[in-house]
Image (cartoon, rainbow, N blue to C red):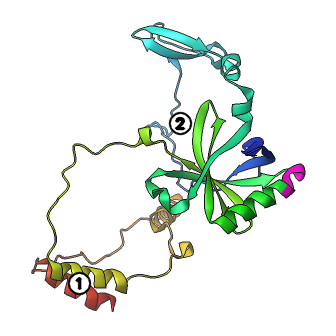
């Protein structure tokens, strides 16, 4: 595996040299845009709005529009002036219970591997987190952005989970959410259904079947075969639409 970042974890006065690796990878199918008449690829061009000409990368800079039509240009040296320490250190600022962090804040996981000189300190932090059942809340800078993260122990490895900031979450002001209370009997039956369908979480059990079907379709079309949709029975809604009857039928089906 190839590391995407190299620096150290700051744990009080202890520094743990580490490398960061992506712990997930996208499995989405990649499609390209083609010209319908001859299947030639469509490319995206960087066009200057004023001159209507394509601009090479060497002539492109990063600018921030601080007022309408007024820009400040920043280069790599400007970003470096913010502070080398912040770009090379994952600073643990607090510890907390993991269940206090709502899942809505989680973005993406990463592996943390210690350098040879940091193995002892890495083991110390790992075992301390495991024994205390806490996670470390930390910050670090990657790609000109300061990330909020948590560091937790999984088996014998430290995992870094990127978090969203509170300000990044959308407040659902315009949504209509019901405030009415359910019928007690219906609620009791819904709880029974939940209990009946409750099993230990096993990630291996869940597959991206839609992508697998798309791949099969692509394979068929590549061989010049006719593609016929699967004959599936249409899901018909029961004639009786009261929730109690539907819950009773669901309980019988899942039994």
Q: CA distance from mark 1 to mark 2?
A: 56 Å
Circle 1/circle 2 CB separation < 8 Å = no
Disc 2 element = loop
Q: Is residue 189 magenta?
A: no
- Tell me which residue sits at (36%, 86%) in the image: 196
Q: Quadrant of the C terminus?
A: bottom left
Residue 198 location in percent, x, y? 41, 81
Point out residue 72 in the picture as x, y percentages from the top left corner: 54, 11
Q: Check the image and report above or below for 138 versus 127.
A: above
Can residue 152 be seen by looking at this rendering?
yes
Q: Position of residue 34 (x, y in %)?
A: 48, 39
- Which of these two is toward me, 14 or 220? 14
Picture layout, residue 61 above or below residue 176 = above
* Disc nearest the viewer among 1 and 2: 1
70 relative position to 81: left or right:
left
The total number of labels drawn is 2
Task: Identify the mark nearer the N-term, 1 or 2.
Answer: 2
Q: Which mark is residue 41?
A: 2
Any mark on residue 189, and which?
Answer: 1
Tell whether position 117 is magenta.
yes
Q: Nearer the viewer, residue 96 or 120?
A: 96
Q: Is residue 244 above or below residue 56?
A: below
> What is the quadrant of residue 251 in the picture?
bottom left
Q: Residue at x 57, y 56 (%)?
A: 96
In the image, which residues are magenta? 116-120
221 displayed left or right of 60: left
Would residue 48 be visible to someone looking at this image?
A: no
Q: Residue at coordinates 40% horizontally, 43% vertically from top-left?
A: 169
């Amino acid at each position: 595996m190839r590391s995407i970042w190299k620096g150290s974890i700051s744990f009080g006065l202890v520094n743990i040299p580490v490398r960061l690796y992506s712990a997930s990878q996208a499995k989405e199918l990649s499609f390209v845009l083609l010209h319908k008449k001859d299947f030639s690829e469509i490319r995206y061009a960087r066009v200057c709005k004023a001159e209507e000409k394509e601009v090479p990368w060497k002539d492109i800079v990063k600018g921030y529009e601080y007022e309408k039509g007024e820009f400040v240009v920043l280069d790599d040296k400007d970003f470096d002036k913010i502070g080398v320490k912040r770009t090379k250190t994952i600073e643990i600022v607090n510890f907390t219970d993991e269940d206090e962090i709502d899942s809505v804040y989680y973005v993406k996981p990463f592996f943390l591997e210690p350098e040879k000189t940091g193995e002892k300190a890495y083991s110390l932090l790992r075992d301390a987190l495991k024994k205390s059942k806490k996670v470390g809340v930390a910050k670090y800078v990657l790609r000109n952005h300061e990330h909020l993260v948590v560091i937790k122990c999984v088996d014998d490895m430290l995992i870094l989970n990127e978090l969203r900031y509170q300000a990044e979450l959308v407040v659902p002001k315009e949504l209509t959410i019901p405030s009415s209370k359910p019928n007690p009997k219906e609620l009791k039956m819904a709880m029974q259904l939940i209990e009946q369908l409750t099993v230990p979480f096993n990630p291996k059990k869940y597959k991206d079947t839609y992508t697998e079907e798309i791949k099969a379709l692509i394979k068929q079309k590549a061989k010049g075969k006719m593609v016929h949709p699967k004959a599936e029975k249409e899901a018909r809604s029961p004639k009786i639409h009261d929730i109690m009857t539907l819950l009773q039928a669901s309980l019988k089906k899942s039994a």
